[in-house]
Structures are given as structure tokens and as C-alpha cells.
Amino acid sequence: MSGQGQVYSTTTVRRRADKGGDYNVAIIELAEGARMMSRVENVTPDKVEIGMDVVAKIITSPDGEPIIVFVPKAGVAT
């Protein structure tokens, strides 16, 4: 998998600031055709747009597990 894709759909989950604040949940359509649920990082939830080009990134969750998130492709050096 190339790790490249586009935001297919998105929603904002609202949380109190003391609980971590708002975040987005997005369905990403990968370049190869599959879709997966994740989130888009490095951008505020209200700025995540359908059709936005994104690239996968592996981060470590608070419980120490690796997870796949996406970042806007415009913010990734090639």
C-alpha cells in the first residue's frame, strides 16, 4: 500500500477541552481503492475536507500501540 489517499467522509467528535478537545473521525479512500476509518492529524477538525489528499503516518497511541493516522499531503515533504 502506498499510504496515499483522500478523505471520503469526515465528522467532528466534540469533547470538553479538559478531555482532550475536539477531534475528527474520517473515512479515507486509499489510492488502491480500499477505505479505512482513521483520523486526520496536524489540522483542526473543522479544516478536514472531503477530497483532501492525505498520507498515512504511524504513531504510538497513549497505551503504547502503533496506530495509522493521516496527515494532509500538502504538509508532507516529498
Image: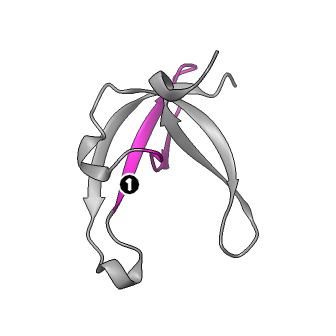
- Principal SS element in the magenta part? strand
Nearer to the camera, 45 or 33: 45
Residue drawn at (27%, 32%) of the image: 50
Q: Quadrant of the N terminus?
A: top right
Residue drawn at (64%, 15%) of the image: 78
Location of residue 19 in the rendering, given as x and y in whole percent from the top left corner: 39, 82
Residue drawn at (38%, 44%) of the image: 43
Count of residue discs: 1
Which span of residues is magenta-colored? 23-42
Is 59 within the magenta? no
Locate residue 22 relative to residue 68 in the image: left or right: left
User: Which residue is farthest bottom?
Assistant: 18
Query: Circle 1: is it few (<14), some (14-19), or many (20+) Cα within 10 Å?
Result: some
Query: Does 23 appear above or below 29?
Result: below
Q: Amino acid at mark 1?
A: Val
Locate residue 17 relative to residue 53 in the image: left or right: left
Is 28 within the magenta? yes
Location of residue 8 in the rendering, given as x and y in whole percent from the top left corner: 34, 33
Q: Secondary structure at mark 1?
A: strand
Locate residue 78 relative to residue 66 in the image: left or right: left
Query: Does 26 appear above or below 12?
Result: above
Residue position marked by numbered label 1 in the rendering: 25
User: Which residue is farthest top?
Assistant: 78
Q: How is the image coloured?
A: one colour
Location of residue 6 in the rendering, given as x and y in whole percent from the top left corner: 42, 27
Nearer to the camera, 29 or 73: 73
